[in-house]
Image: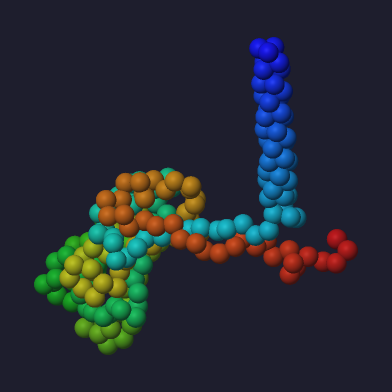
Amino acid sequence: MAEQKKKSIDRRSFLLNAGRAACGLALGGLAYRVISAHMDEETAGPKSRYVWAINPDKCTFCGKCETACNRTPSAVKAVNDQKKCSCCVVCYGHISNKQIPSEKIMSDGERVCPEDAVTRVNYSGGKDGYFIYDIDDNKCTGCGKCAKACNDKGTKSMFLIIRPDLCLNCNGCNIAAVCPDGAIERLYYGPEDNFRGIYELEGM
């Protein structure tokens, strides 16, 4: 009786293990087919593209973008929205000593940017006329001092961006990790496309 019961248990265990093995093989084969299809460029379909961006509603221009980025200088740059800019004779993001005479702004003005990256060009009207302010991205280090001054006292036309052409698009952004305001966000940009369908020549 005991021997018959033992044989019944052994048979049940064998069938159970065999069933598990069969399921494992089936799932393994399915996973292999799915993964191998995605690894093959011809069958994988479009990949998703994401970019790191700064949320202007959260950014407080703390200065960490300048030092935390894996790139040196940082992929973060200041920009000036000309539609919002008042094009004033004296710009809060350009100089800090606002009472200086107009003709001495370029020579004696105390620059807000330590790298003197904010440029000032007379567009019209002479020394008290209409001025265009821009950011020299070759000098800009992403410190955000010009943007902070503009947002605190001016028209908020200056702000920081992560340049997609400079960003290394790391899976884990160092700036996002240290940003105290959670202003660095990863945004869906769209599917990747190598444009082979457009430019590939027939027969090649």
Residue at screen point 36% across, 56% down: 184
Dividing the picture into quarters, in which one does residue 158 lie? bottom left
Question: Residue 174 in the image: x percent, y percent?
Answer: 39, 46
In the displayed orientation, state which residue is furthest to the front.
1
Left or right side of 13 for 80: left
Question: Residue 52 in the image: x percent, y percent?
Answer: 44, 57
What is the basis of the colouring in this image? rainbow
Question: Residue 176 in the image: x percent, y percent?
Answer: 36, 50
Left or right side of 127 for 139: right
Residue 65 in view here: yes
Question: Residue 149 in the image: x percent, y percent?
Answer: 21, 65
In the displayed orientation, state which residue is furthest to the right.
203
Dividing the picture into quarters, in which one does residue 160 lie? bottom left
Left or right side of 106 for 98: left
Above-or-below relation of 33 to 198: above
Residue 121 in view here: no
Q: 40 or 84: which is nearer to us?
A: 40
Residue at screen point 30% across, 79% down: 84
